[in-house]
Amino acid sequence: MRRTDPQSIGEIIRQAMEAAGATEAYDLQRVCTLWPEIVGPTINRFTTRRWIDRDVLHVAISSAALRNDLMFHRERLIAHLNRAAGKNIISNIIFH
């Protein structure tokens, strides 16, 4: 089968990722990369590590006071991350 309509590189990559079943992994990784954009450079400076296990974002914070403060803003951070990602990917954040 031969294509007659041109496709953008982004569309070709999206189709390949869907065919490989990698869109969910991409979305999860994208949330990790959005963390500095959402919290800003000051808070990100205290972030030592972040990872996702299932739909839970784990964030290691080097400051105990900041970690305690972020726990109070957990729901708002989840909403901002999901909104920036364009879909509900994260259901919880655990601060370490």
Image (cartoon, rainbow, N blue to C red):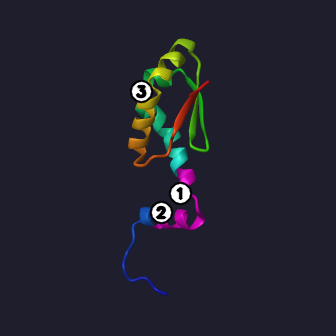
Q: Residue at x 56, y 68 (%)?
A: 19
Q: Amino acid at mark 1?
A: Thr
Quick check: 49 above or below 27? above
Residue at numbered disc 3: 40
Q: Which residues are magenta?
A: 12-26
Residue at numbered disc 1: 23
| Tag 1–tag 2 contact (CB < 8 Å) | yes
Of the numbered discs 1 and 3, the one sitting upstream in the chain is 1
Quick check: 88 above or below 7? above
Quick check: 12 above or below 63? below
| Residues at marks 2 and 3, CA–CA distance in whole angstroms | 29 Å
27 or 82: nearer the viewer? 82
Of the numbered discs 2 and 3, the one sitting upstream in the chain is 2
Q: Secondary structure at mark 2?
A: helix
**CA neighbours of label 2 inside 10 A, class few (<14), some (14 to 19), many (20+):** some
Q: Secondary structure at mark 3?
A: helix
Q: Amino acid at mark 3?
A: Gly
Q: Residue at x 43, y 38 (%)?
A: 81
Q: Which mark is residue 14?
A: 2
Question: Residue 80: image x %, image y %?
Answer: 40, 36
Closest to the camera, between mark 1 and mark 3, is: 1
Residue 37 covered by magenta stretch? no
Answer left or right for 62 relative to 83. Answer: right
Main SS, magenta region, reads helix
Quarter occupied by the C terminus:
top right
Question: Residue 84: image x %, image y %?
Answer: 39, 42
Q: Amino acid at mark 2?
A: Arg
Q: Residue at x 51, y 40 (%)?
A: 91
**CA neighbours of label 1 inside 10 A, class few (<14), some (14 to 19), many (20+):** some
| Residues at marks 1 and 3, CA–CA distance in whole angstroms | 26 Å
Q: Secondary structure at mark 1?
A: helix
**CA neighbours of label 3 inside 10 A, class few (<14), some (14 to 19), many (20+):** few
